[in-house]
Amino acid sequence: MNNCAGIGGGGMGSGSGPYDTKIAGLYDLLDTLGSGHFAVVKLARHVFTGEKVAVKVIDKSKLDEVSKSHLFQEVRCMKLVQHPNVVRLYEVIDTQTKLYLILELGDGGDLYDYIMRHESGLSESLARDYFRQIVRAISYCHRLHVVHRDLKPENVVFFEKLGVVKLTDFGFSNKFCPGQKLETSCGSLAYSAPEILLGDSYDAPAVDVWSLGVILYMLVCGQAPFQEANDSETLTMIMDCKYTIPQHISKSCKRLIARMLVRDPEKRATLSEIATDPWVTAGEGVTVEDFDTPLVAKEQLSEEDRSAIIQKMVNGSIASKDQILESLEKNDYNHITATYFLLAERKLRTKRMDAVRRVDAVKGARRPAALGVRGAAAPALPPRALLAPPTFTAAPRTPQDVPPVIDPHTKYNSISLMYNSKIVDQRLQYFSNRKQVYRDN
C-alpha cells in the first residue's frame, strides 16, 4: 500500500489546495479506494486518534441540482439511521466546492465478492447469520421511514474486528410516508422490483423486501436469480418472476425466498413477517425486538470510560468539556463527535476482544485463523464468530461510482437507473406494450 501521507496524496492532485483547509490537520488522506465521475473515496487516518476511516470526497461543482438534492438526501438519511448494522457517518465537512463524508471503514471486503468465492452458495446457517443482520438494518431504517432502494451484496460490507456485516451506500435512499407511494425509478437492475421496472408508483418498503429476496437467493445459491445474457432477458425474467432454486436448498429457505420474490407487492412478505419466519429464527434465539436495536454508543460505555475519553479530548485540545457534551447532546456531525465516537468504539472494541480472549482461555480453545471454516473436531463458536470475511478493504460506493456501461460478465452487472436516462427510456419502451398483460396476470 502506498500510503501517501498528507492531504494532497493518493491522487488528489496539486489542484486540491483550495478545498483542503477544512480537512488539513484533521485527517491524513492516504490511498484512493474508489472513484467515479462525481466522487472519490479515500482511505484516511484520523490524526488525533490514529483510527482509519473512509472519506468520500464529492465534487459539488460536477453535480446538477437534481444530483445535489439526492446527495443531501443521502446525508440526511445517514444521519437519521444509526444502527449497529449500518455503516456509521462520523462527520460531514462542507466546503464551497467539495463535500467530505467521513465514514466507518469496512475492513473485510463486501458480500458480493465473498459470495462469488462460493460457487454453490454459503451454508444456510452462515447465510442466516448474514441475512439476519441485513434485515435488522433494514427493519430499523423502515421504522424511521427511510427506504434504501439499492439493496445488493455490493452494499453490504464486512467488519472483521466487530464480527458483523453492515449496510452502506444510501445514495438512493429517501424518506417515505406509510401508505403513500414513491415515483422515482432507481436502484440496480438485477435487484430491482418489477413495479420499479414498470415505471409505476410503488410502495417503498416492498421494493426493499424484493431486494432482500434476491440477496437471500444469492447467499444460498451463489448466483443471482435473475442474471441473463443481456438486459432485455434479465428484465423479462424479473417481470415473469422466473427463477430456479437448487435442490439442496431447504424447503423452509425456498419458502421464504418465494414469499419475498412475488411480483405483486401487496402479496409480498412484510419485514415483520420475514423477521419472524421460521427459517430466520431457527437456531439462535432471535426476538422481533432484536431487529430494531438502535446504536447508542454512549450508553454502552461506563461513566468512567466516558469521562476518560472526554478528558483525553480536552487534554488533546480537541474541545472543552462543555463543548464536547454540547456536541454530543445536539447529535452534531463535526470533528468533536467524530473524535469522541472513534475513541469510544476503540474502547468498546478492546473490551470485546478482551472478553473473547477470556472466554477462549476458559474453554481452552483457539480461534481458527479463517473464521467460519472449522474442522470436525473444532469447538462450537459463538454466532458472531461465524463470519468469514474476505481479506481486502471495501470502500463505500456512491450511485455515481456505478459504471454506465453494462458488461454481463463482470461484477457490476447492474445499472443505476436514476442516472441513465437512455436506459430508462429503453426500459419503458420495452415494456410499454406489455404493461397491461402483466397487470392482468
Image (spheres, rainbow, N blue to C red):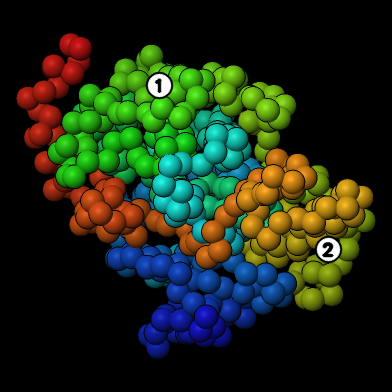
Residue 114 position within the rendered picture, expressed as x and y whole percent measured from the top left: 48, 52
Q: Residue at x 22, y 31 (%)?
A: 237
Position of 80 with respect to 119 (left or right) is right
Q: Which residue of the protein is positioned furthest toward the bottom in this rendering?
A: 14
Q: Is residue 245 above or below residue 295?
A: above
Cα separation, mark 1 vs mark 2, equals 49 Å
User: Element type at marker 1?
Assistant: helix
Q: Residue at x 12, y 41 (%)?
A: 425
Position of 304 with respect to 288 (left or right) is right
Which is more toward the observer, 410 or 341? 410
Mark 2 Cα-neighbour bin, 10 Å: few <14, some 14–19, many ≥20: some
The residue at which mark 1 appears reads as 258
Front position among marks 1 and 2 = 1
User: Element type at marker 2?
Assistant: helix
Q: Is residue 103 visible?
A: no
Residue 223 position within the rendered picture, expressed as x and y whole percent measured from the top left: 37, 42
Which quarter of the figure has residue 54?
bottom right
Q: Amino acid at mark 1?
A: Ala
Q: Is residue 366 visible?
A: yes
Whichever of callouts 1 and 2 sits on the residue coming sooner in the sequence is 1
Q: Which residue of the protein is positioned furthest toward the top in this rendering?
A: 440
User: Are the residues flagged by discs 1 and 2 in contact, CB closer than 8 Å?
Assistant: no
Q: Quadrant of the C terminus?
A: top left
Q: Which mark is residue 309?
A: 2
Q: Is residue 67 above or below residue 132?
A: below
